[in-house]
Image: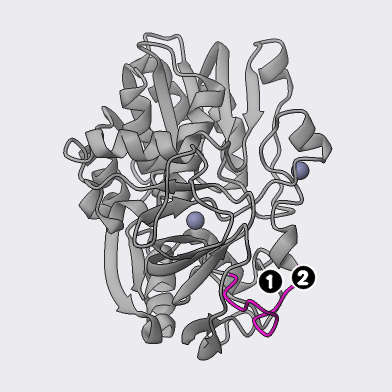
Amino acid sequence: MNGRIVVFNGPRTDFTVREYPVADPGPDEILVKVTQACVCGSDLHMWRGETPPFQKPPGVPGHEMTGIIAKLGRDRHTDTLGRPLKEGDRVAYAYFIPCGSCWACLSGTTGCPNRYRLRAALTVEDPPHFHGAYADYYYLLPRQWVYKVPDELPDDLVAPVNCALSQVVYGLHRIGIWLGDTVVIQGAGGLGINAIAVARDMGAGRIIAVDAVPERLALARAFGADAMIDLREIPNRADRVARVKELTGGVGADVCVEVAGVANVVQEGLEMLRVGGRYLMMGNIVPGAAAEIVPHDAVRQPKNLLGVLAYDAWVIPRAMDWLTRARHRFPFDRLVAGRYPLEQVNQAFQEADWAAKAGQVPRAILTC
Ligand SMILES: [Zn+2]
Ligand SMILES: [Zn+2]
């Protein structure tokens, strides 16, 4: 049996689609037939050469996906929660595997620096070839988190669950949302839109979205943001900070979530927070992107600053459980852009790149 794999040949070059043999999974592995994968902002960063790819070229791109179990390894019978698995079950899974033995893992911090170690040194030429999402198959390795998908959830909602939604669920859990909090969301992109919905259900009172793109602000409103700060209407930072103060009776926001991916919004976020406010930083993932901040604003007006990357094992099943209940209250269908068969991956990326530059949020979907 052969399967197709999209091959990454280097930044800003065309992907090629090649076929490779599909081997049986090892005793503790699971062979997944991928049904759907998404083009995420991170995938675009890698394709443009702005962040390192998961594997050196020729590698297998993609990390957001879902699929059905094609074959269970001899010793693998359950998902990470101990629920029985069988061939044909729909599954969602993390795309990284914490090492469990570094200082981050041992101290309970996510974002293990070794989480891609098992595939990072491989190329598509190395068995078992299927190292990423954009392919007919994917091997879940020993100890890789995997979860049965609730029947009610359509694939469109499941494929991106291991990235933006899980990141947001974990980040907001870490920073903590208190009942009635005023939450500022800096950047109404994929993370920001999910953060609005999750913060609402965690008990946020007023949610303020900051962005410059009309479509993104419209999405923020559709997902329940109460107030918008449009950077085109309020181009001056001090005026935006004043607007947040005005909306909070002069106090400042309780929580600010940086999901803009723009380095120089950090100082603005600090200024929008009240004394004792909490700042969650998740958007700035490009190495070396610098910004100036005034440390005084976090010390003499004390604030908690927290950077979060990746998430813990409990998050994906919680995120799916929440989605099954929340999917009719939030317009998640508006987060889906075009659908492309695997062979049209180059067209998918070109259009996704164009859409991302125009500030559009919906994700392109590759169907396998
Ligand atoms: Zn992603
Ligand atoms: Zn580790």
| Cα separation between marks 1 and 2 | 6 Å
Residue found 56% across the figure and 37% down from its top: 313
Name the residue nearer the viewer: 264 or 155. Answer: 155
- Pointer 2 local density, CA inside 10 Å: few below 14, some 14–19, many at least 20: few
Residue 89 magenta-highlighted: no
Residue found 56% across the figure and 45% down from its top: 283
Residue found 71% across the figure and 29% down from its top: 108
Left or right: 332 as drawn, with respect to 97: left
Q: Do the residues labelled 1 and 2 touch (CB within 8 Å)?
A: yes
User: Label 1 amino acid?
Assistant: Gln
Left or right: 326 as drawn, with respect to 13: left
Left or right: 77 as drawn, with respect to 27: left
Secondary structure at badge 2 equals loop
**Coordinates of residue 346 in the picture (x, y in percent):** 44, 84
Above or below for 232 versus 65: above
Q: Name the residue under label 2.
A: 121
Look at the image and give the residue range highlighted in magenta: 121-131
User: Of the residues under marks 1 and 2, which one precedes in the sequence?
Assistant: 1
Residue found 62% across the figure and 59% down from its top: 141
**Coordinates of residue 246 in the picture (x, y in percent):** 37, 16
Secondary structure at badge 1 equals loop
User: Label 2 amino acid?
Assistant: Ala
Name the residue nearer the viewer: 32 or 119. Answer: 32
Which mark is on residue 55?
1
Residue 126 magenta-highlighted: yes
Name the residue nearer the viewer: 295 or 106. Answer: 106
Q: Can residue 14 be seen in this view?
A: no
**Coordinates of residue 91 in the picture (x, y in percent):** 40, 54
